Amino acid sequence: MKILVTGGLGFIGSHTVVELQNKGYKVVIIDNCSNSSPDVLQGIQSITGKKPIFEQFDLREKEKVQNFFSRHDDIEGVIHFAASKAVGESVENPLLYYENNLSTLIYILQQLSYKKSANFIFSSSCTVYGQADELPITENAPVKPAESPYGNTKQIGEEIIRDTCKVTKNLKAISLRYFNPTGAHPSAEIGELPIGVPQNLIPFITQTAIGLREKLSVFGNDYPTSDGTCIRDYIHVVDLAKAHVVALQRLIDDKNTTNYEVFNVGTGTGSTVLEVIQSFEKVSGQKLNYQIVGRREGDITAAYADTTKANNELDWKAESKLDDSLSSAWKWEQKVRG
Ligand code: WQD
């Protein structure tokens, strides 16, 4: 069975390609390499022994998307990762985000709507909840006005899929709302490759520990939490990748209850920034140089998932704990920079 993975050379995409291949799927990747490298193909192949088919082009080029689907009319499912995802950049350049994240989604859905049947998995984010009123966060929590154009593209993207599924009965779709993806494949053959100064906590920690960054700035310790720092649900990227495969299999096996479903994908456990630092120091055996600074604009206090729905309906549960994520991230950093 042939599956298209857009953005398949990216952090979550590449780990999902590995898990798809492990389950016997034939994978085709489309990636424009704007935030990834074709070298990742070697990493995937070194883990699974199978090299995915790879086509490099920009999904904003509608004719190329049409041409791709005419050449690959045996595609049974699409997992759509390709998107811009830097919150800060989206505030500076909203039109880039609305064009890139939404036009590409629309062009793919148009092609899928012409097929007899199609299965679609969408890369969404817990960012759609904003600061939820209740924790842990369930899928019924209200979607709040987005804090950034990036978050808005995830909200609008979900609505586009929902409305398309309402009138396109041959299309089945699932949106996976990720919490905080982190870590790297245990083989250290693939992992996160942030370009420039990392925006996210874990890559900044590992780059500080390896000596690439002088110190980590902890954005605020005056939040109403146990130690004053923000709480997040850090999920190992391999667990997250596996969730995509079971979600796709659910659609292929017609086990979905409606033709558009939403699942939170997290560990169900929240960790403060200081707890992450303590965990990293434990698994790496070295002290981390950090300082407390002011809050970062747009940060919410706490977010962690209620994973009951995914546990029960996808028969999926995150297996790795925070320590595992951090030790795999550290092993990857040492491999890449060592
Ligand atoms: C986590 C915590 C920061 C960096 C973002 C996106 C979200 C998703 C995941 C794509 C926060 C603190 C961070 C640093 C710090 N991306 N921090 N110093 O903001 O929860 O989520 O990435 O889908 O959509 O919003 O993740 O890793 O940036 O921050 O203190 O140098 O670490 O304040 O509390 P975030 P993050």
Image: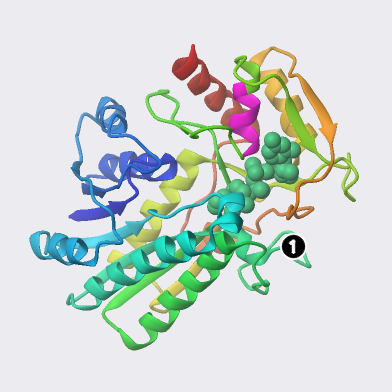
Q: Residue at position x 32%, y 32% from top?
A: 40
- Is any part of residue 179 visible from this angle? no
What segment carries the magenta color? 200-207
Q: Find residue 103 and report its horizontal and vertical position in percent.
A: 36, 68
Q: Residues within 10 Å of mark 1 (few under 14, many from 20)?
A: some
Q: Please, is residue 206 above or below residue 231 in the view?
A: above
What type is the residue that disc 1 sits on?
Answer: Gln
Residue wearing tag 1:
131
Badge 1 residue CB within 8 Å of ligand 1:
no
x and y percentages locating residue 280 in the rendered image: 68, 24
Specify the quadrant of the image occupied by residue 249. bottom left
x%, y% of residue 63? 18, 66
Magenta residues, dominant SS class: helix
**In the image as oriented, which residue stretches furthest toward the left?**
71
Instruction: Answer left or right for 262 relative to 121.
Output: right
The quarter holding residue 173 reads bottom left
User: Which residue is nearer to you in this view: 312 or 154?
Assistant: 154
Whether the magenta-drawn stretch holds residue 235 is answered as: no
Could you tell me if residue 31 is visible in this image? yes
Residue at point 26% right, 27% down?
42
Q: Is residue 64 above or below residue 32?
A: below
Looking at the image, is 89 positioned above or below residue 212? below
Q: Left or right of 162: which side holds 304?
A: right
* Towards the viewer: 112 or 34: 34
**Which quadrant of the figure has residue 104?**
bottom left
Quadrant of ligand 1: it is top right
In-front residue for pair 180/187: 180
Q: Residue at x 24, y 66 (%)?
A: 62
Helix, strand or loop status at disc 1: loop
Q: In the rendered view, does 261 fall on the left or right side of 264? A: left
Q: Look at the image and say whether residue 204 sits in the magenta stretch.
A: yes
